[in-house]
Image (cartoon, rainbow, N blue to C red):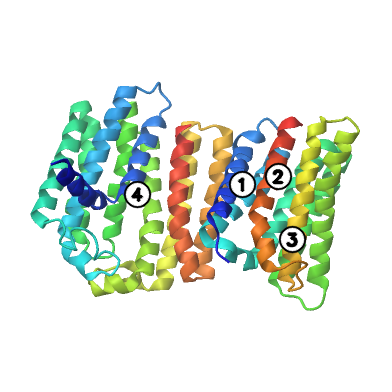
Amino acid sequence: MIHALRTRLRLYWPLIKSLQTGLLLSTGLAGYLSAHTKADLGELCGLAISLFLAISGSTILNMWYDQDIDTVMERTHNRPLAAGKVSRREAFWLGLVLAAAGVGMALAMDILYGLVVFAGLFFDVAVYTIWLKRRTCWSIAWGGIAGGMPILAGRALAVGQIDLVGLLLSMSVLFWIPTHILTFSMRYHADYQAARVPTFPSTYGFEATRAVIALSAMIAAASIGVAGVTIGVQAGALRLMAVLSSGLLLLSFATVFRPSERVNFSLFKYASLYMMASMILLSV
Amino acid sequence: MKLKMLDRLLLLGTALLAAYQVMIGIDGLESLPTIAYTIAFGALLVAVLLMLILGFEILDSPIVVVVSTLIPLSLSLGLVWEHLESWRLAYLTFAICGFLAILLTRSLRLPGRLPVIVLALVHGVAGMVVFLLPTVLAAQGETSPGFALVGLGGALIGLGGVLLSFLKAERPIVSRETILRIFPALLLLTTAAFVVGFALQ
């Protein structure tokens, strides 16, 4: 029994894309801690659990819907659903239960917080994955909006309203996401072509995509900087954010003016590191 | 040559120390030294992060010359501004002109020895300031003896700079493998000497 359960959990774990979920969860926690009010440990734990459940559920529902795409793509064909190790029905119910539990818990904690968490789930699964992903490359804008919801939710839970700082933080994630997803879609261009998923590189070409990445990185860095100043983050943390932002801008410009596969992938990795570091700095 | 686990740990340690210095180590200083030290340790931090991501290949990039100038130049500017009041304006002018000269001679790809002469002059002066100023101040008792560690850091980073310069000029003093093997440890020791030296100031 325990062995069977462990085997199932081992199969379920890749379904939630732990790194991505962890990063989004960290933005939610940073949004909460950015209020710099006396943190309620119980509320913070509730936030972590509800967000983890909602983000995991939404990720599994995405994977459930995109199983046919994952099967075609070289990068994803070994995922448990695409490889047939977990059935579609099982994944659907698992995703639905986790998502419902996460949103339910969030609503029970605070109505506004719950509504923002639900909005994130709705934008991610219904608008991004089911409605737009196979139709237009602009679907990533909605994916970005969904990605910005955890940090907005965390902030809303802490301050009891949707304020300017929350929107700025959300915008920083929204504009960080293209640096992440677009570099990925260039690296795995052939994969997306094979799966017939419209991407920026396939629609507008690599050069335009690189320009969008550089512009997005600039807006993301500016949004985080303005949010940091508005929050009243310590001068030292602001200095460090400025330094890390300059690295992000440097790499973004390098993708435009000295494009190469390595620079492209470096930007992808640096952008994740940048976001994680910025979240920590906003919280201190 | 690929980064080994030990290299990664040493570089991570360097990145954390540089981040600490930017965030906490230079608090409470005047505006210009704060900016100068932020540029110095910030450039070091970003360079180390890129090395962690890209590996030693980043050292072959032309931008390394600019970054490796930025670090001693801005560090020496901060030191002069803090400790040699009468030289402030002159050194600020030298730092700005020196940096622009390197940028121009590198981006315009001028023929002849001018780019090398400009680089050696600017690097040499900045390196000597970082090495000598804290050492002399500590020896004269004007700062705590621990401040001499900043001078030691200057000597170490100077050594790294010389090794890299010869490597880039394809006249290495020691083999590329040896340089790359000691480079992460050298960077960590340098940064640790700077951070401790400034803390003891």
Q: Nearer the viewer, mark 1 or mark 3?
A: 1
Q: Nearer the viewer, mark 2 or mark 3?
A: 2
The Cα atoms of the two marked residues, 2 and 3, are separated by: 16 Å
Q: Residues within 10 Å of mark 3 (few under 14, many from 20)?
A: few
* Depth check, front residue: B79 or B20: B20
Residue matched to label 4: A19
Q: Nearer the viewer, mark 2 or mark 4?
A: 4
Q: Residue at x 59, y 49 (%)?
A: B10
The Cα atoms of the two marked residues, 2 and 4, are separated by: 36 Å
Q: Residues within 10 Å of mark 2 (few under 14, many from 20)?
A: many
Res A116 → quadrant: top left
Instruction: Please tell me if label 1 and label 3 are on a single chain.
Output: yes
Instruction: Give the label on residue B36, or none.
Output: 2
The answer to whether one can see residue A120 in this image is no
Residue matched to label 3: B100
The Cα atoms of the two marked residues, 1 and 4, are separated by: 25 Å
Helix, strand or loop for disc 4 = helix
> Which mark is first along the chain, 1 or 2?
1
